[in-house]
Amino acid sequence: MKNQEIISEYSFRGILKEVLSYKSGVAALVILIFFGVMILYTVIRFPYGETIGLWNSSTAFLKNPRNAPPVWWSIFTGKKDPRNIELKFNVDKSNITDEGNIFKTELKKDFLYDYDDFPTELNIFFNARYRKDPPLVKIYLVRPDGDKILLKEHTLRSEEDVLYLSNDFSLENRLDSQVRAKIPSGIDFSVTVTRGLFLKYSGKLDVLKGNYSLILDVELNDANDELTADAVVYGKVYGIAGTDHLRRPIHIALLWGAPLDLSFGLGASLSITLLHLIIATISGWYGGWVDSLIQRFTEIYMVLPFLPIMIMISLFYKLNLWSLLAVVVLLSMFGFGIKTTRALVLQVKTLPYIEAAQVYGASNWRIIFLYIIPKILPPVIPSLVASVPVYVFLEAILALFGVLDPTQPTWGMVIEEAFNNGALYKGYFYWVLIPSSLLILTAISFSLLGFILDRIVNPKLKEL
Amino acid sequence: MTNIVMGYKDDPSFRNLSEERQKELIESRFKSEMKRRGLDKPFPIRSVYHLKNAITLDLGRAMYMTSDGGSALVKNIILERLPVTVILFTTATVINFFLHLFLGLRLSRKYGSFWDKLVIALSPTSVIPGWFYGIFLIMIFYSWLHILPPGGLVDYPPPSGTIPYFLSILKHMVLPLASWIIASLFLGIYQQRTFFLIYSTEDYVEVAKAKGLTPRQIEYRYLLKPALPPVITGFALSVISSWTGAIVTETVFNWPGLGHVVSQAISYFDAPVIVGVTVIYAYLLAITVLVLDIIYAIIDPRMRIQG
């Protein structure tokens, strides 16, 4: 059949070969494969339901630093920024000394601190099981120069207790007078808890590098009481994409943003292009009142302001990403694409093979779906591919207006949160730059591919 | 409903009534309030009623927002902000239009040169919308270099005198304008160039060349003139898209225009304002299409004959 020969000119292999003959085509495919691998990794490594639950829980990420840039950020700053140090303490039953009613034990952990900057916070998370009275904990820090500083004497307030040492005022005051006593020439900076603990006594704001140890003197009231403690010395950098204002690691949102954003973009452009194709073919093939009805509809649709209506609908009905996709498709069902495709259909309609099909009695629907649409499909594909970024950015726009479902992490949501928390003005550039560059990579790869496919199906363009 | 119940509870004169009587009163007040807002009618009838209001530009009152003049009428809120939007985005569209037209025309004559190849290579960058470049421009010129303001219309406090005031607006316009120009520059030039290249293979252009006309004469008389109708269409479409694109750009740059009203209304959940702005946008688009048709008739004689 002649019809099939026409399609076979655009075999998948042939197109791939031709795409790879362009340097930009190779680049586009490499980026797309990268995203493909990323999506596969995400879907397998972070199951959707669990990850979303984690992302929206308020306690899951308490042990991460707040607003920390990614680890590789320190390449640009040229300093060795502190990373998170987590020390796990566990009361060992065999090591308890019995002193009458009190059971004592000393827990000690060493850690190397050789970073150029002070830690941001110092918290200890306790988890205890006790029968009568809560245990008492004395916390000491031993500095490399031999100073042993008592941080706090603390009786647990409940079985799960958090000690925010860096917010402790009395400790801060004690450290302040201690530092001032050590440096007779005086200091021109304020002493916070983390500064006071990790300061080199030189009069300048320098970190004393070396081996520190944290000591917990635990007094239990019963031999069978248990206690574990997690001491976290919060760093300044975290993970491959940093953390946000709620200490959540941004890379989780970015990883899940890839499948969500790309399926939104691909789904929208695919279904819109196909709908345009079908509607335009029906309009061109039937002619008469069907044609004029569809054309008038298209003209009305073209005058409707798409974005404001989109924002209005998603604000009033609080839709999630997938129902939003349906709204996008409905709102762009009759678009400008119908006019151009209809012109194509009118040309194809007069070709002999269509006439032959009519002669042997093919039905209207058979002609539309099997003879006309496959014929006009190739010229439409470049615009399909090239319009994917439009919808990916539409997602970002809707997120920016805060009308998207806030529990679904997408690239747009990350940028929106960065904006709302003043990332641009406070200098948290990584927060905007990383999702933005992912968006840009997606956009560029799809549009490069679109350009090349355009050249393949419109050979005229090659000459120009 | 909550509003009515709260208003009722605050009113001391009802306190002595029995429980049942109170419920009855609340119910009747609720019903009359529904009737006042027209919510007791079925949806199709309400739609027609709202459509009539929208067409006659009777946009009602805002729920929470007021215009800078203090009026709660949606019409006043919108009319106050409309010129601010027009200043920025019409300027941007006009600059873009002429830039693309003339650079495209130039490049189509020097086709195959280094600049030509550069423009082609960079044209995929235009899929990234203007507001997105805006984010980067803010980062570079405000957060990093501290030479341009990140957004807003004028300095605070606004400078006194017309000329300093005007200059201050100009300073705030630089970044949004730049973001729009960068965003569409390469694809715009590429499209115009390809378009003119198709025209330059026509026989009459060859004839003109053979006659010995200067390149400039060929460019304006034989290339630009016949290509004008589609070029104008492109311009009108870009004006249309600028109306909607403006919403996001204004939000990013805090530009107090119509788009900013939309984002404010979203944060207040001020339904009448959102509906009003949507109606105004629809009017703007319709007017643009109408003007386009009239311009077509003026520049293209064929259109006039067909009527």
Image (tube, coloured by chain):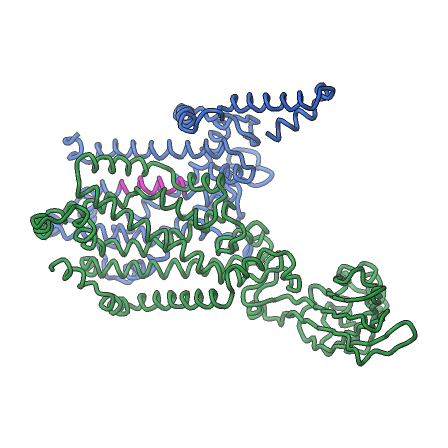
Chain colours: A green, B blue
Work out which residue is located at the far front of the displayed protein and give it: B20
Q: Majority secondary structure of the magenta segment?
A: helix
* In this picture, residue A173 sits left or right of residue B306: right
Locate residue B132, reporting x and y percent. 45, 52
Instruction: From this view, report whether residue A96 is shown above or below residue A453.
Output: below
Residue name at image x 46 percent, y 29 percent: B79
* In this picture, residue B143 sits left or right of residue A114: left
Q: Nearer the viewer, residue B43 or A212?
A: B43
Locate residue A32, reporting x and y percent. 37, 65
Highlighted range, magenta? B232-244
Locate residue B193, reporting x and y percent. 25, 52
Task: Quadrant for residue B27, please give it.
Answer: top right
Q: Is residue B233 magenta?
A: yes
Is residue B105 at all visible to an observer of this figure? yes
Quadrant including the C terminus of chain A: bottom left
Instruction: From this view, report whether residue B138 is shown above or below residue B18.
Output: below
Residue name at image x 51 percent, y 33 percent: B271
Instruction: From this view, report whether residue A180 is shown above or below residue A147.
Output: above
Residue name at image x 52 percent, y 57 percent: A432
Q: Is residue A175 magenta?
A: no
